[in-house]
Amino acid sequence: MEILKERYSITELAEMLQLTDHALRFYEKECELSIPKDERGRRYYTTDLANVMYKIKLMRSEGLEIKAIKKILQDDNIFGQPVVIQESSNTSVIPAAGKEYEAMQVIFTELGRQLTKEISYELDNTREHLIREISKSKLELGACVENSVRRLESKMERHYEQVDNALSRWREKKKKPSVKNAFKRMFGTKM
């Protein structure tokens, strides 16, 4: 794309980038770009904004999501100064021949660094959350086991009391002489 003047209307820029006006407004809104307006309230794009829109178009054509592009634009501003080629007195936002690969490599390196940083942060948060949840679960499980043991001990205690009472009754019964036992002892025979 050749930059022939300092400002472009949305229609002119859309035509140069082979996009629709709607696409430019969408990128502007989603990437939270501040686009100036002239005295009549119509938006215009400076050379820098035209370069940013071109880069957004490149990243979209590479398959990047709008959220990722917005993050790249906002976080570290990895683009720095726009890549501009001098052709006589005109400037262009198209990278120099053979530089596209290097520009994309820089973008993907930075994207990789950002993703690594974010994934690491999320993993740390998740690990801390899991540790808290496991500790909480261990305490709850310990309380459940303790309650179960207490209930089992109580149940066993009642059972032993019942067995003990039954044995005591049986012993008492054995101690009391019955008529049968008395005849047995006296006569040594069965009745």
Image (tube, rainbow, N blue to C red):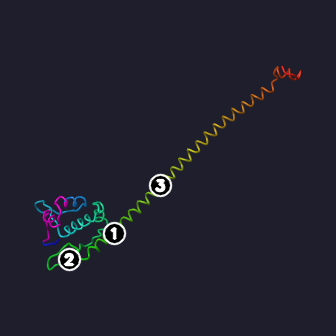
What is the three-letter code of the residue carrying label 3?
Answer: Leu
Residue that mark 1 sits on: 110
**2 or 1: tag closer to the N-terminus:** 2
Front residue of this view, candidates 44 and 64:
64
**3 or 2: tag closer to the N-terminus:** 2
User: What residue sits 23% from the left and 62% below the top?
Assistant: 33
x%, y% of residue 151?
60, 39
x%, y% of residue 159?
67, 35
Whole-number angstrom distance, CA of label 2 to CA of label 1:
23 Å
Residue that mark 3 sits on: 130
Front residue of this view, candidates 124 and 185:
185
Q: Main secondary structure of the magenta part?
A: helix
Instruction: Kindly report which numbered mark, 3 or 2, lies closer to the viewer in this rendering.
Output: 2
Whole-number angstrom distance, CA of label 1 to CA of label 3:
30 Å
Quadrant for the N terminus, please: bottom left
What is the three-letter code of the residue carrying label 1?
Answer: Glu
Badge number at residue 85: 2
**1 or 3: tag closer to the N-terminus:** 1
Q: Is residue 82 located in the magenta-colored stretch of the structure?
A: no
Describe residue 54's horizontal placement relative to residue 39 as left or right: right
User: What residue sits 56% from the left and 47% below the top?
Assistant: 142
Q: Which residues are magenta?
A: 5-24
Regarding mark 1 in the picture, which secondary structure is present there?
helix
Total number of numbered labels? 3
Q: Which image quadrant for residue 158? A: top right
Residue 146 higher or lower than 127, as above or below: above
x%, y% of residue 78?
30, 70
x%, y% of residue 59?
26, 66
Whole-number angstrom distance, CA of label 3 to CA of label 2:
52 Å
